[in-house]
Amino acid sequence: MVIKPKVKGFICVNAHPGGCSAYVDQQVEYAAKQSINGPKRALVIGASSGYGLASRIALAMASGADTVGVHFDREPTERKTAGAGWYNNQRFEKLAKEKGLIAESLNVDAFQDDAKQTVIETIKQTIKQVDLVVYSVAAPRRYVAHEDKWYSSVLKPIGAPFEGKTIDTDKGEIKTVELQEANQDEIDATVKVMGGEDWLQWIEQLHNAGVLADGCKTIAYTYIGDQLTWPIYGDATIGQAKKDLDKTVARINTLLQHDGSRSSKSQTAGNSAYIGVLKALVTQSSAAIPVMPLYISLLYQVMKEQGTHEGCIEQICRILTTGLYGDNCQIDSAGRLRVDEYELAEEVQSEVKRRWERISNENLRQLSDFDGYKSDFLKLFGFGFQDIDYEVNIDTALSE
């Protein structure tokens, strides 16, 4: 079939196989030029796209790591394309295996115990143990089998209603968004879906199965942001889930007592678990959060003008080389590894805020990089690559 993007609000419901290959290839090209003195066996939980996929690419191509990747995506049929993550991981596997690396991709629901056991058995049969576990799961809801209950996350403020600017990405128009404050049940459900409970359960089961190597590390990613995003991000339901991630670090470090084999010179010596704070980028998750599309459009323009803009693969390579496997990363008072310093620089934030106050439908494309935002959004699903002929009939089952 001829595959054109079908965008509904903040999601694209189809994906282009060849474009997804191009999406992976661009990141592979960058990562292959880097050098990470990192792990040789890694498990990436949440490898569909964004920071999770970038982690898998960086670990394989810059550190030479064998990887097991967990993603949860629709598989292709004769009439429908697969989800982008399915094509992404198919392409990654091909490129990794061409380099002589082990690359196993499991399309399963990471929240479920049977999925965890399947992953554990795959590790035992292939790479035996893992030196790093990356947790990068972003899902709107979670089924808890022993409760036979679904939990759904919400994107709401806490304590008071919120009214602010956002952008209708379909129409390219500035509009006002109004959100009612979350109740306690909604807060609790959001923490259940997006907090640290599942990360901890993964580490517990991997540990009990004996597939965590001595000195194994684990990292989960988060976003903190600044004043413009706090009402809907930091001081909101998502923020409560992120605080739960912080608490989980201490619990994992208690669970995994290291044998002291790691060099005492490393800034991360003695710990097992970390939170990595990354910059705001266009991902399938951020596109769903009110305010963020407009903020990111403004941020992109300012950071590109100042020469400090980075994408997913650049951010991940930097946090791996300077933080998790290096000694040159900013660490905040909570012990988080920070590579969002360029976004939070005073000259960046002050200019974003100045433009935020002035932005209108008339000057949207002058003050922001909305076109760049839309381009990056479509590329998440394999669309908008210049070298791809989108008029050609293509088999939906092809991964390249």
Image (cartoon, rainbow, N blue to C red):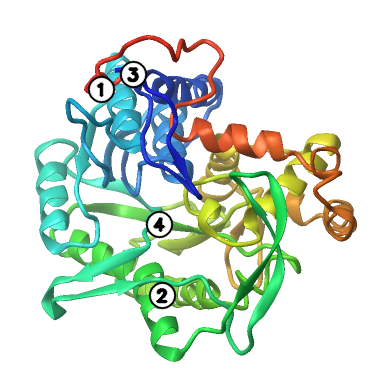
Mark 1–mark 3 Cα distance, whole angstroms, equals 20 Å
| Circle 4 Cα neighbour tier, 10 Å, few/some/many (<14 / 14–19 / ≥20) | some
The residue at which mark 1 appears reads as: 396
The residue at which mark 3 appears reads as: 95
Mark 2–mark 3 Cα distance, whole angstroms, equals 37 Å
> What's the amino acid at mark 4?
Ala
| Circle 3 Cα neighbour tier, 10 Å, few/some/many (<14 / 14–19 / ≥20) | some
| Circle 2 Cα neighbour tier, 10 Å, few/some/many (<14 / 14–19 / ≥20) | many
Expressed as whole percent of the image width and height from the top left, the position of residue 210 reads 15, 57
The residue at which mark 4 appears reads as: 138
Decide: is 331 above or below 134. below
Image quadrant where one finds the C terminus: top left
> What's the amino acid at mark 1?
Thr
Please tell me whether mark 4 sits on a helix, a strand or a loop: loop
Please tell me whether mark 1 sits on a helix, a strand or a loop: loop
Q: In which quarter of the image is residue 333?
A: bottom right
**Residue 190: mark in rendering:** 2
First of labels 1, 2 by sequence position: 2
In the picture provided, is 374 more to the left or to the right than 305? left
Mark 4–mark 1 Cα distance, whole angstroms, equals 25 Å
Q: Residue at x 50, y 84 (%)?
A: 182
Of marks 2 and 3, the one in the foreground? 2
Residue 340 is at least partly visible in this image: no
> What's the amino acid at mark 3?
Leu
Expressed as whole percent of the image width and height from the top left, the position of residue 359 reads 84, 53
Q: Residue at x 37, y 31 (%)?
A: 15
Mark 4–mark 2 Cα distance, whole angstroms, equals 11 Å
Mark 4–mark 3 Cα distance, whole angstroms, equals 25 Å
Of marks 1 and 2, the one in the foreground? 1
Image quadrant where one finds the N terminus: top left
Q: Quadrant of residue 40?
A: top left
Of marks 1 and 3, the one in the foreground? 1
